[in-house]
Amino acid sequence: MSRSFRFPLGLVFSPAARRAVCAALAGLLSGQAQAQDSTLTRLVHNYQYNLVQNGTQFSGPGWEKLRQDIQKSTLVLVGEDHGMAQIPVFTQAVAQVLKPKVFVAEIDRYQARDLTRLSALPGLPTAFEKQHPMALSFYSWTEEFELARALRAQNTALVGVEQVGAATPGRFFTVLAEKVKSKSARAYLRDRATVYQLRDRAGMVSGKYERATMTTLSPAGLDSLRAFTRNESPEVRQMVTDFAASSQIYHDNNAGKAGAHQARLNLMKRNLLTELQPYQKPGEPLPAMLFKFGAAHLGRGRSISGNFYDVGNLAVNLADMHDQKTLHIFIIGKQGTQVGGANPDDFSKNVAPYNHDDQDMVKPFVASTTPTGAWQVFDVRPLRRALLQDKLKVATQELAATILGYDYVVIIPETTASRNF
């Protein structure tokens, strides 16, 4: 026997009427979805501009839009997908317009000091890299190192705010050994530097990082480090404190412990405020600053990676305090290759193909970019206004975070992986 269907308002429909109502509702919802897709597509295309790369030079209407907004900004934040050779070249062009006093990088302060020293020397630091592979993190790749060299040529200070680098224990303990006065401490630190360097290098070669020093160093090992350096200089003790705090973050993150990522973000924010002090006198406005991090870190508001408020959000707060302006640029490739490993012996094993057609955070922008055409620049601010005014709805939180967090999205049709030295 057929049964009737009761809607919440108490109305009773026959099965045939129910099917008609449901079909009508489905059609209405489909029409709304299509209208939203049409609005998104229209806004993306209306504010899309070509950008032409010619070596380290850029031109076209997209570059002109970017150039004008860079000139109006004090803090420019370049959110990237790591390991693409074209992105540091783009960042160098941004720096030529901005002329930053400070470059804030996603590396630690000790890596930044090594990078500052090495980038002032002729040639590439191949001997340093051979002894301490990936000790400069992303700047262990040729294009990234050349960006650092170009920034130093502009008298830009290189600043690192990240936790102690995952690949740096060998180098870190070597530096510690050079700074201590106690012979027993020096011998202990040199021994640990050798052990850690060999262990971490083996992990890079095998691609298996579960035994990496930063994730496996025991509390007893940290206690020994503190004991050997207890009577050393404040500088040495601060290094030990930084190392221990970073090790805890790696441990907690590796174990999937809640709060590990937030602890990392909090550390980066504190480090940024500390590292900025030499370049900003009390009461004075911020100096021109250029940031380059993974894109999850540099948007305003809620991060692409979830319910976090990252370094980009702090940058907005700092600029607001001084009535200054930030500009947030998200740059990523549509397809191609990028670095996907850290093998120090055979860099070809680090080259990984990718395709970002289905990446929710940039999907409509990637869809509007042809693989063999010019770079594409999208002014996201009109989309943001439509989203905030409830004139536009998007399907995913990741895409919403991109639209709300970034002013421009730049899509490179095809990238190549960064190279080693």
Image (tube, rainbow, N blue to C red):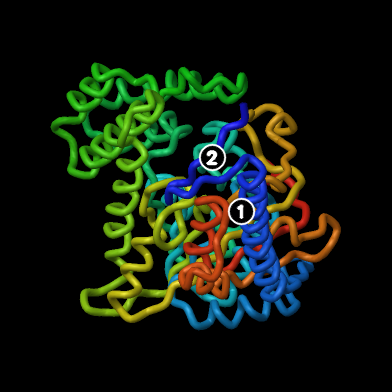
Q: Amino acid at mark 2?
A: Phe
Locate the C terminus by quadrant: top right
- Disc 1 and disc 2 in contact, CB within 8 angstroms: no
Rendered view: 274 above or below 323: above
Query: Looking at the rendering, which quadrant does residue 83 occupy?
Result: top right
* Side of 247 where 361 appears, left or right: right
Residue 42 visible in the displayed image: yes
Who's the residue at 51% across and 22% down the image? 209
Query: In this figure, what is the number of numbered marks?
Result: 2
> Element type at marker 2?
strand
* Residue sitting at the far left: 231
Rendered view: 280 above or below 136: below
> Element type at marker 1?
helix
Who's the residue at 29% across and 26% down the image? 186
Foreground residue, 6 or 184? Answer: 6
* Residue denoted by label 2: 5
Q: Where residue 142 appears, x then y in whole percent?
A: 65, 48
* Side of 147 where 181 appears, left or right: left
Foreground residue, 249 or 362? Answer: 362
* Side of 92 where 327 appears, left or right: left
Mark 1, residues whose alpha carbon is within 10 Å: few (<14), some, or many (≥20)?
Answer: few
Rendered view: 403 above or below 5: below
* For marks 1 and 2 on the same chain, the one whose residue lies earlier in the sequence: 2
Q: Tell me the tag on residue 25.
A: 1
Residue 123 visible in the displayed image: no
Who's the residue at 43% across and 51% down the image? 9
Query: Looking at the rendering, which quadrant does residue 285 occupy?
Result: bottom left
Q: Amino acid at mark 1?
A: Leu
Foreground residue, 418 or 194? Answer: 418
